[in-house]
Image: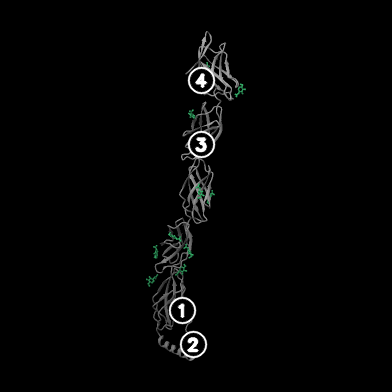
């Protein structure tokens, strides 16, 4: 380092000559055969970070000083000066070993104290979240030079959370969802304390859990799921889980539509919010029940003239059923836990609308329509038997509205007899019948296909003999 010459220019030439003379004569006396002592009182001040100044006490007989600065990774620099201080460059996280030697003509001073100087640890800079949830940030970073411990700080502007660890990972919990936090990782060493100039990064926690407000039925297999939430720019996903499987829908507003849900099923619905940074916990779940399925295989069988038996197969989700037959002339209804029931007050010869309501445990109903049903033709009334000449019998009745062809069957121990009549007639004849027997008479309307209904009432008559031919015909009450 250049030093003395500037000062000397100030003086006159004579003064310069005088000074040189004095200096030279002093040296000759003093430096003749001794080296300076080792400089002591080494101190270091760091007014500008990264550029500290080392200073030491002035040693007699010294002409100049050389400071050797050796970094703990082996790199060495020196500075050569006639002053008693010198600046050097440092980097974070190193130990610098400093030794100062004084020189004169006779040579180098002995080695004095080796002074050591540790710089502040470096700052972790590659830190970032490894995991984000609604209330937790897990921050990881790479180890940095000189750090013995790390202090992680999250700051929301008014509230600070800290965690200290020697590890390079830290979980900060009990945070608020959907909130920006300034995260800073400070390094710490025993000797230098914290490096306070570490910079922060802004990290947002995962969205808050939404809350389902209601479910709206659009139709039997479609439902809108509504929720409330205070998140911005978040994707919501509603999921319905049940025995039948799981269905999802997505939305960025306050609802989404679940469609194609099967009938007669129970679901538990919950909504989750997610952003690029993370996913919220699912909302508390809401029950969703779809309407019962419609029963299949409905059969309607007439049991008596005024009563029918409806039966069907079991339907998923249904607990009870209401069957209904409706016509302009009246309606019949039954409500049952079984898969069949009897409907009374059926009018013969009437076409009915058939519906079956399947009702769930919670009272949720599906109304299912079926093909119309026609009750059978009415049984004739006023049936009477008369004797004809020649061992014959005439059966007589009253013609009812919507008349049909009729068939009359007479049963006895001596044989069975049948006569039929077309719709416009009110009688038919059996030409030959054995006397002295009891006859059961059944008269039924015949269907187009010739089949007979089985429920028209029976009447019993005694046919007496008068000699060998038919005598009196007597109606027998049961
Ligand atoms: C230091 O400076 C002096 C005077 O300029 C010179 O003689 C000496 O060789 C230098 N020492 C080193 C180590 O550079
Ligand atoms: C640094 O100096 C102090 C005292 O001056 C000493 O206790 C310590 O062991 C030294 N550290 C190293 C790494 O040499
Ligand atoms: C803290 O670390 C940074 C970078 O790692 C470094 O530049 C700075 O000098 C250090 N702070 C101090 C006070 O040394
Ligand atoms: C985070 O730090 C920046 C810069 O210091 C500041 O502008 C911002 O308000 C801080 N945010 C919070 C949530 O503290
Ligand atoms: C910061 O967090 C605290 C505690 O969680 C809370 O009381 C405060 O309102 C928050 N401040 C801001 C600006 O969000
Ligand atoms: C973390 O360590 C620093 C330095 O030792 C200390 O000042 C601070 O109080 C500690 N914080 C916690 C939360 O332990
Ligand atoms: C369901 O919630 C949404 C939004 O909160 C509202 O618009 C709608 O009227 C609600 N429906 C019912 C049936 O409460
Ligand atoms: C909803 O979003 C998720 C994630 O983006 C995606 O995997 C899923 O297929 C979406 N579902 C529907 C029904 O759009
Ligand atoms: C009605 O039909 C069902 C199913 O065929 C049968 O189990 C039930 O016994 C019938 N009831 C009557 C009264 O006929
Ligand atoms: C008459 O009909 C009844 C009932 O169908 C039957 O059991 C009986 O055998 C029949 N009698 C004769 C003689 O055919
Ligand atoms: C009644 O019987 C006649 C003759 O057997 C037949 O032509 C007609 O189709 C039948 N009518 C009905 C309603 O069964």
Q: Please say if 80 is above or below 262.
A: below
Crowd around label 2: few <14 · some 14–19 · many ≥20 (10 Å): few
Q: Where on the picture, by quarter, is residue 55?
A: bottom left
Q: Which residue is mark 2?
A: 10
Mark earlier in primary sequence (3, 1): 1
Farthest residue to the bottom: give it: 14
Going from N to C along the chain, the mark reached first, 4 or 3, is: 3
Single out the residue that lies furthest toward the top. 467
Mark 4 = which residue? 458
Give the CA separation, mark 1 to mark 2.
Answer: 24 Å
Residue at the spot of label 3 = 357
Q: Which mark is residue 194?
A: none
In the image, is 362 to the left or to the right of 449? Answer: left
Q: CA distance from mark 3 to mark 2?
A: 119 Å
Disc nearest the viewer among 1 and 2: 2
Q: Residue at x 51, y 19 (%)?
A: 459
Tell whether label 2 touches label 3 (CB within 8 Å): no
Residue 313 makes an appearance in the image: no
Q: Position of residue 329 (x, y in %)?
A: 55, 30
Answer whether labels 2 and 4 touch (C-beta < 8 Å).
no
Q: How many C-alpha atoms fall within 10 Å of the one at disc 3: few (<14), some, or many (≥20)?
A: many
Residue beneath label 1, please? 80
Query: Is residue 215 at all visible to an observer of this figure?
Result: yes
Q: Nearer the viewer, residue 42 or 294?
A: 294
- x, y percentage for residue 352? 55, 31
Alpha carbon distance from label 1 to label 4: 140 Å
Q: Secondary structure at mark 4?
A: strand
Q: Is mark 1 within 8 Å of ligand 1?
A: yes
Are discs 1 and 2 less than 8 Å apart at CB? no
Residues under numbered marks 3 and 1 in contact, where contact means CB atoms less than 8 Å apart: no
Q: Earlier in the sequence, mark 1 or mark 2?
A: 2
């Amino acid at each position: 380092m250049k030093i003395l010459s500037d000062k000397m220019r100030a003086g006159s030439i004579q003064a310069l000559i005088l000074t040189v003379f004095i200096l030279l004569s002093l040296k000759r006396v003093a430096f003749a055969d001794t080296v300076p002592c080792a400089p002591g009182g080494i101190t270091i001040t760091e007014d500008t970070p990264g550029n500290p100044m080392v200073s030491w006490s002035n040693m007699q007989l010294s002409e100049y000083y050389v400071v050797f600065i050796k970094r703990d990774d082996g790199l060495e620099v020196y500075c050569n000066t006639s002053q008693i201080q010198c600046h050097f460059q440092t980097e974070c996280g190193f130990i610098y070993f400093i030794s100062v030697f004084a020189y004169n003509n006779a040579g180098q001073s002995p080695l004095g104290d080796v002074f050591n100087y540790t710089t502040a640890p470096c700052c972790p800079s590659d830190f970032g979240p490894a995991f984000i949830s609604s209330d937790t940030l897990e921050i990881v970073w790479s180890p940095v030079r000189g750090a013995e411990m790390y202090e992680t700080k999250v700051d929301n502007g008014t509230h600070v959370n800290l965690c200290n660890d020697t590890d390079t990972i830290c979980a900060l919990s009990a945070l608020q969802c959907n909130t920006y936090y300034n995260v800073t990782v400070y390094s710490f060493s025993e000797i230098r304390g914290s490096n306070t100039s570490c910079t922060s990064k802004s990290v947002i926690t995962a969205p808050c859990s939404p809350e389902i407000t209601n479910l709206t039925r659009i139709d039997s297999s479609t439902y809108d799921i509504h929720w409330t939430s205070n998140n911005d720019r978040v994707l919501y996903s509603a999921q319905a889980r049940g025995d039948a499987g799981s269905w999802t829908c997505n939305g960025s507003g306050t609802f989404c539509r679940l469609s194609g849900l099967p009938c007669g099923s129970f679901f538990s619905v919950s909504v989750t919010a997610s952003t690029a940074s993370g996913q919220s916990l699912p909302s508390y779940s809401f029950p969703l029940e779809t309407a019962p399925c419609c029963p299949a295989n409905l059969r309607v069988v007439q049991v008596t003239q005024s009563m029918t038996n409806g039966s069907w197969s079991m339907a998923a989700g249904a607990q009870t059923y209401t069957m209904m037959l409706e016509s302009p002339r009246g309606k019949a209804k039954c409500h049952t836990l079984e898969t069949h029931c009897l409907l009374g007050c059926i009018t013969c010869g009437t076409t009915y609308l058939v519906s079956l309501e399947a009702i769930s445990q919670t009272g949720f109903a599906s109304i299912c329509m079926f093909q119309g049903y026609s009750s059978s033709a009415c049984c004739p009334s006023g049936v009477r038997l008369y004797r004809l000449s020649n061992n014959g019998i005439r059966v007589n009745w009253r013609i009812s509205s919507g008349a049909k062809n009729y068939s009359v069957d007479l049963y006895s121990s001596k044989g069975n007899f049948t006569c039929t009549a077309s719709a416009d007639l009110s009688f038919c004849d059996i030409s030959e019948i054995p006397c002295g027997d009891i006859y059961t008479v059944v008269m039924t309307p015949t269907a187009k296909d010739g089949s007979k209904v089985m429920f028209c009432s029976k009447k019993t008559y005694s046919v007496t003999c008068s000699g060998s031919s038919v005598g009196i015909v007597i109606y027998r009450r049961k």
